[in-house]
Image (spheres, rainbow, N blue to C red):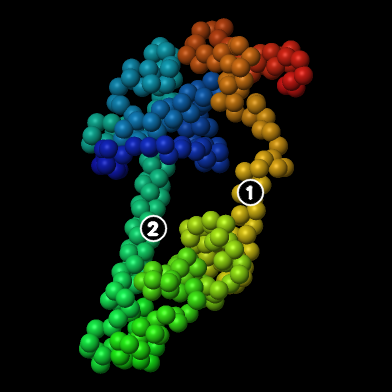
């Protein structure tokens, strides 16, 4: 009996990495039952499914699956019962696996959360922009003085009610809240509003440290991220702690940009870097498609690259 398709047919990874959960793999019955020579093919199978559309699925055809993972059909037929254990057919005619499907659903959930976060951020910014544009040009109040006594076009209480008095009062609005044109908040004011929205109340738009960080080009998103850290801390941290986080991040970014104290990354830390070194020394990339009996394994290829590097004068392996 076929099952319901777990997610939309157009679901794709779109650059989302397929990360292996070592603990989950080791606890898997399929991994425990698979012989040692079959386990690498299991990893290739999961990776191939992740690249399919829908993401995490496989075609319900043995020959296509074998071709996708680069396994000879005769070998696939022999180990199929171990390799395809746990895969089930859905209503779309494709094969799915509960473990891989769970990873896809986690990916979709994370994407939706990120989409909502960005939408809420845009709505908040639009609300701030709209709220600051309710006043009339030039800072003059409409003639109906009694309709909103004691408030100017920034939404701040002034205690005045005539257009002339409000024009004067608007020009004396607190430093950092409203810019010289009386319609756009200064960067410090906008930053403090964004920080308050994250739950940090003791902001100070006149803080010299805040102004210095803004002058260095620190974007409001960085302050918001630091505010989230402070709000989630136990106990919650305040504005001074937030500024410390931003200053530390700014210093770390400067150190990374200058390269100070950054050790050179070893060339043999990943397959990509190893193959890049192999091309550099003239050995080319590893032939992963060679499935012959005497095929060169990747560790053997790595050793060959290392010997070539050692032969190059003045370059350590």
Circle 2 residue? 117
Of circles 2 and 1, the one toward us is 1
Q: Which residue lies at the image location 31% right of the left edge and 35% below the top edge?
A: 54
Above/below status of 200 relative to 24: below
Q: Find residue 239 and report its image quarter.
A: bottom right
Q: Which residue lies at the image location 47% right of the left edge and 32% below the top edge?
A: 30
**Separation of marks 2 and 1 at Cα, in angstroms:** 28 Å
Q: Find residue 243 and report its image quarter.
A: bottom right
Above/below status of 71 relative to 148: above
Percent across and percent down for residue 280 are 61, 17
Using residue 160 as the reference point, say whether residue 269 is left or right of it.
right
Query: Residue 254 bears which disc, if any?
Result: 1
Label 2 Cα neighbours within 10 Å, binned few <14 / some 14-19 / many ≥20: few
Using residue 176 as the reference point, say whether residue 106 is left or right of it.
left
Q: Find residue 207 and report its image quarter.
A: bottom right
Percent across and percent down for residue 101 are 37, 40
Q: Can I make out residue 88 in this image?
A: no
Q: Can I make out residue 168 in this image?
A: yes
Percent across and percent down for residue 97 are 37, 36
Q: Secondary structure at mark 1?
A: helix
Between 284 and 302, the one nearer to me in the picture: 284
Q: Which residue lies at the image location 62% right of the left edge and 43% below the top edge?
A: 257
Query: Residue 94 bears which disc, if any?
Result: none
Q: Secondary structure at mark 2?
A: helix
């Amino acid at each position: 009996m076929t099952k319901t398709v777990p997610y939309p047919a157009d679901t794709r990874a779109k650059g989302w990495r397929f990360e292996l959960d070592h603990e989950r793999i080791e606890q898997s019955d399929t991994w425990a039952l698979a012989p040692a020579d079959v386990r690498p093919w299991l990893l290739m199978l999961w990776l191939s499914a992740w690249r399919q559309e829908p993401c995490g699925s496989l075609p319900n055809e043995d020959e296509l699956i074998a071709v996708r993972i680069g396994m000879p059909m005769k070998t696939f037929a022999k180990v199929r019962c171990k390799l395809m254990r746990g895969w089930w057919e859905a209503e779309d005619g494709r094969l799915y696996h509960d473990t891989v499907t769970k990873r896809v659903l986690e990916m979709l959930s994370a994407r939706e959360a990120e989409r909502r976060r960005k939408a809420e951020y845009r709505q908040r910014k639009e609300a701030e922009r709209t709220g600051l544009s309710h006043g009339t040009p030039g800072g003059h109040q409409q003639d109906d003085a009694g309709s909103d006594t004691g408030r100017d076009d920034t939404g701040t209480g002034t205690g005045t009610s005539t257009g002339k008095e409000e024009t004067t009062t608007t020009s004396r609005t607190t430093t950092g809240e409203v810019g010289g044109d009386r319609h756009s908040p200064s960067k410090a004011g906008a930053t403090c509003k964004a920080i308050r929205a994250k739950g940090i109340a003791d902001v100070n738009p006149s803080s010299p440290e805040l102004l210095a960080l803004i002058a260095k080009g620190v974007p409001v998103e960085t302050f918001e991220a630091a505010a989230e850290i402070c709000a989630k801390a136990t106990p919650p941290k305040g504005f001074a702690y937030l500024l410390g986080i931003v200053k530390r991040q700014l210093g770390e970014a400067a150190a990374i940009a200058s390269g100070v104290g950054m050790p050179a990354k070893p060339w043999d830390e990943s397959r990509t870097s190893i193959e890049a070194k192999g091309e550099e020394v003239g050995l080319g990339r590893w032939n992963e498609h060679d499935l012959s009996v005497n095929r060169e394994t990747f560790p053997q290829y790595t050793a060959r690259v290392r010997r070539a590097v050692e032969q190059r004068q003045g370059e350590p392996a």
